[in-house]
Image (spheres, grey):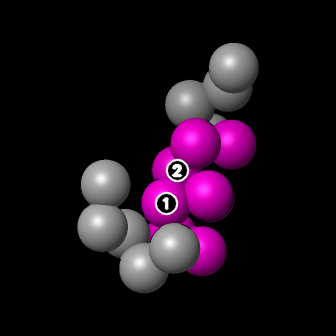
Amino acid sequence: MNLYALYKLCSSRGNEY
């Protein structure tokens, strides 16, 4: 799993991770 992908996913969710 790429960190960038996770970051993008978090950003899409509103950065609530």
> Can you say which quadrant of the picture contains the C terminus?
bottom left
9 inside magenta stretch: yes
Question: Disc 2 on helix, strand or loop?
Answer: helix
7 inside magenta stretch: yes
Give coordinates of residue 16: x percent, y percent.
30, 67
- Reply above or below: 16 against 1: below
Q: How far apart in space, not on screen, are marks 1 and 2 (Cα)?
A: 5 Å
In the drawing, what numbered circle is on residue 1? none
- Main secondary structure of the magenta stretch: helix
- Reply above or below: 10 against 3: below
Residue under pointer 1: 10
Name which residue type carries label 2. Answer: Tyr
Name which residue type carries label 1. Answer: Cys
- Classify mark 1: residues with Cα within 10 Å, few (<14), some (14-19) or many (20+): few
> Which residue sits at x=49%, y=60%?
10
- Classify mark 2: residues with Cα within 10 Å, few (<14), some (14-19) or many (20+): few
Residue under pointer 2: 7
> Which residue sits at x=42%, y=79%?
14
Q: Please state the extent of the stretch shown in magenta in the rendering.
A: 5-12
> Can you say which quadrant of the picture contains the N terminus?
top right
Contact, mark 1 vs mark 2 (Cβ under 8 Å):
yes
